[in-house]
Amino acid sequence: MNSSGTDWSSLSERLHRIYKGKIEVVPKVPVSSLDDFNVWYTPGVAEPCRRITRDGEDASFEYTLRWNYAAVISDGTRVLGLGNIGPAAGLPVMEGKALLFKYLGGVDAIPLVIKENDPEKFVYIVKALEPSFGAINLEDIESPKCFYILEKLQRELNIPVWHDDQQGTALVILAGLINALKIVGKKISDVRIILFGAGAANIATYRYLVNAGAKPSNIVVVDSKGVLHLHRDDIEKLKVENPWKYKIAIETNPPEVRSIEEVFNGSDVLIACSRPGPGVIKKEWVKKMNKDPIIFALANPVPEIWPWEAKEAGARIVATGRGDFPNQVNNSLGFPAVFRGVLTVRARKMSDEMFLEAAYAIAKYTEETGISEERIIGSMNETELYVKEALAVAEKAIEQGLARRKLSRSELEQEIRELIERPRRYMEIAMRNGFIRKY
């Protein structure tokens, strides 16, 4: 039960059984008689096929759904807080992700769970799927395998590839932190930051923080074995098995080996993406931080420290991953708009610069609409946030030469806005007419 008295787990189980899935395929072209299939299928469909053969694979973006089609792909090895539950058990999550893609970003997404744990074979399967899609969203893949898979697919595919547990989480964290720092009057280049947890989310967050102006020497990373530094007993093993974490150890390398408790002394920001609490982060540790500390306790379903405990210990701003507390750091503020932006311009790749623009757009929109200690980031019901974010991503893709389409700002905004608003209008019509039954 939550603060509203609703047992979400029991309700979700019952409704999943009733609806038997969250998305379906519906026609988008008019069919008034069977003669229409002479256009949409044989013999007429042969002409688009010939045009694609003649003009090259990129022409498929003009003649098919590919321009707005994304795959949500997982092997089920790290699903939410449930761990390695396998692809079939992970399918409800991927389907829910596809629903969010459509409802929030106007993106047609399809969930694909793959029964393959070998990273090379997984990459081979995704590469074989490339001609069907305009972008790939990797989801819930265990670390460090997820880093290898992402980097290899980014190199070898000619469509954008994104891993939401990396870029999505990091992007939204950065957006929230930008505004939190404005409220407390500190600069990202000056603050001392603790990254508590060294999985996919915080390893990506480290990179984004540095790209946004944070100094590696001001960042300390803590994993399940303690403080990450070059003199740990497992450092040579990390060099081979997890070079992404090893790189952080080289770049941060605290000047002296400290206990986890000592790491909090004089720190300004804590970003925890570790294991569910409570009690993972102790009040006594927060009390050792500088004045007006910022706490991001993002484990789900229970944060590493309860927000009220962090506040009692002196925290000025607290963010969690939950929607029933202020300042929810929610990946759903990122991926629908990012994909909307790259798909609108038919981008060939994604870049860190595009993700930074997305974070800055979220932060700017939130500031313009009013930031406070309990609102450092916008919410999922603010459509304009998604429009501004997608526009920023699309424009950066054009600027970097990664876009197949080049549109003016006004053309981009009009198209993006229409695509983002359309699913909500469709939902209203479908529910009003009983095509989607209310529960």
Image (spheres, rainbow, N blue to C red):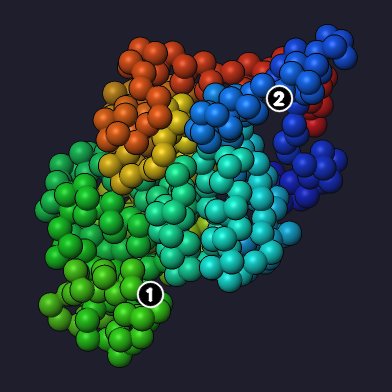
| Depth order, front residue of 157/354 | 157
The amino acid pointed to by label 1 is Asn
Quadrant of residue 358 within the rendered picture: top left
- Residue depicted at 36% across the width and 22% down the height: 406
Mark whose residue sits in front, 2 or 1: 2
Is 43 on the left-hand or right-hand side of 198? Answer: right
Q: Are marks 2 and 1 in contact (CB under 8 Å)?
A: no
Q: Residue furthest top?
A: 32
**Residue 396, numbered circle:** none
Residue 359, can we see it? no
- State the residue position of label 2: 46
- State the residue position of label 1: 242
- Residue depicted at 53% across the width and 36% down the height: 57
- Residue depicted at 19% across the width and 69% down the height: 252
Query: What element does badge 2 sit on?
Result: helix
The amino acid pointed to by label 2 is Ala
Residue 383 vertical placement versus 199 (above, below): above
The location of residue 58, given as percent across then percent down, is 50, 33
The location of residue 378, given as percent across then percent down, is 40, 32
The location of residue 194, given as percent across then percent down, is 27, 63
Is 321 on the left-hand or right-hand side of 114? Answer: left
